[in-house]
Image: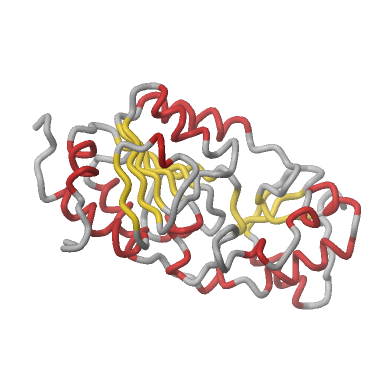
């Protein structure tokens, strides 16, 4: 328990929730060594996101080479789940959060043992052909890049390869968005962790939950765009706050028990 943090407002709503929908953003992974995008040290503080549109990726080989070099140097392959990811897994294994919706592309929820993860922005652990749409593990393509193939193309159809992530200007996968919104419709509480809740349409998931009667509990190290909509806000690092919250929640009987 964190003596300086009042968990009770959040516990009040989560104890009464039969079905919690966890919604996570970059802030849940920063303590695993993965930088966020919009925070004080975020990636977009030093880079222009307009350069990395799907249109530029298709048209400009230099952009593609840069993105593949970035992927080679990414800390994601060496990152490991932190206590916040593990807390989400414990919450799910206790039957309280059957589905997790994430904006993250790092796969750390799955490495922590969480199942039924909806990755709204895709995953960097797979590669996808922009032609035939075949998907495969990214490792083999990274080996090709290391060996000098700095603009890899599909070995089956010859079209461009790209990590299976959603770039600027690229539509989210409709089935994933629909699934996330359906989960939001049926949750009793949405537990948003590590997100500024400023990126749309992903931020529409907690909004949808509230509009359908769910309570919104936010855990974030800073203000979010949906603070005014929240029923409870816990400020602090996800790796500290979330384990304490889940510990407290799972040591108390649910209100319907």
Left or right of 235? Residue 122 is right
Dividing the picture into quadrants, the one containing residue 141 is bottom right
Q: Examine the rendered structure and indicate whether residue 72 appears above or below residue 55.
A: below
Which of the two residues, 209 or 143, is positioned nearer the viewer here? 209
Q: Residue at x 73, y 64 (%)?
A: 47
Q: Examine the rendered structure and indicate whether residue 23 appears above or below residue 18.
A: below
Q: How many marks?
A: 0
Dividing the picture into quadrants, the one containing residue 131 is top right
Which of the two residues, 132 or 230, is positioned nearer the viewer here? 230
Q: Examine the rendered structure and indicate whether residue 200 appears above or below residue 183.
A: below
Horizontal and vertical percent for residue 229?
40, 34
Horizontal and vertical percent for residue 67?
75, 64
Horizontal and vertical percent for residue 203?
52, 38
The colouring scheme, among rainbow, by chain, secondary structure or one colour, is secondary structure
Q: Examine the rendered structure and indicate whether residue 89 appears above or below residue 180.
A: below
Residue farthest bottom in this picture = 147
Q: Quadrant of the N terminus?
A: bottom left
Which of the two residues, 136 or 177, is positioned nearer the viewer here? 177
Q: Residue at x 42, y 60 (%)?
A: 111
Horizontal and vertical percent for residue 217?
33, 42
Q: Residue at x 53, y 48 (%)?
A: 103
Q: Quadrant of the C terminus?
A: top left
Residue farthest front in this picture = 228
């Amino acid at each position: 328990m964190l003596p300086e943090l009042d968990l009770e407002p959040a516990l009040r709503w989560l104890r009464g929730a039969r079905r919690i929908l966890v919604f996570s953003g970059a802030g849940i992974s920063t303590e695993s060594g993965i930088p966020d995008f919009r925070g004080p040290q975020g990636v977009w503080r030093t880079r222009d996101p307009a350069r990395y549109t799907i249109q530029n990726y298709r048209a400009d080989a230099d952009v593609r080479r840069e993105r593949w070099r970035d992927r080679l140097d990414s800390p994601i392959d060496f990152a490991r789940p932190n206590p916040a990811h593990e807390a989400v897994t414990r919450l799910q294994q206790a039957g309280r959060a059957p589905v997790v919706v994430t904006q993250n592309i790092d796969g750390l929820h799955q490495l922590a043992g969480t199942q039924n993860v909806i990755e709204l922005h895709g995953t960097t652990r797979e590669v996808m052909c922009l032609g035939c749409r075949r998907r495969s593990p990214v490792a083999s393509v990274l080996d090709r890049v290391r060996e000098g193939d700095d603009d890899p193309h599909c070995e089956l159809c010859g079209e461009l390869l790209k990590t299976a992530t959603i770039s600027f200007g690229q539509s989210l996968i409709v089935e994933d968005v629909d699934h996330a919104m359906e989960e939001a419709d049926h949750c009793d509480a949405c537990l948003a962790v590590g997100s500024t809740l400023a990126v749309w349409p992903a931020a529409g998931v907690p909004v949808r939950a509230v509009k359908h009667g769910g309570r919104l509990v936010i855990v974030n190290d800073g203000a979010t765009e949906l603070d005014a909509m929240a029923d409870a806000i816990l400020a602090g690092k996800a790796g500290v706050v979330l384990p304490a919250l889940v510990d407290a929640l799972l040591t108390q009987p649910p209100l319907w028990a």
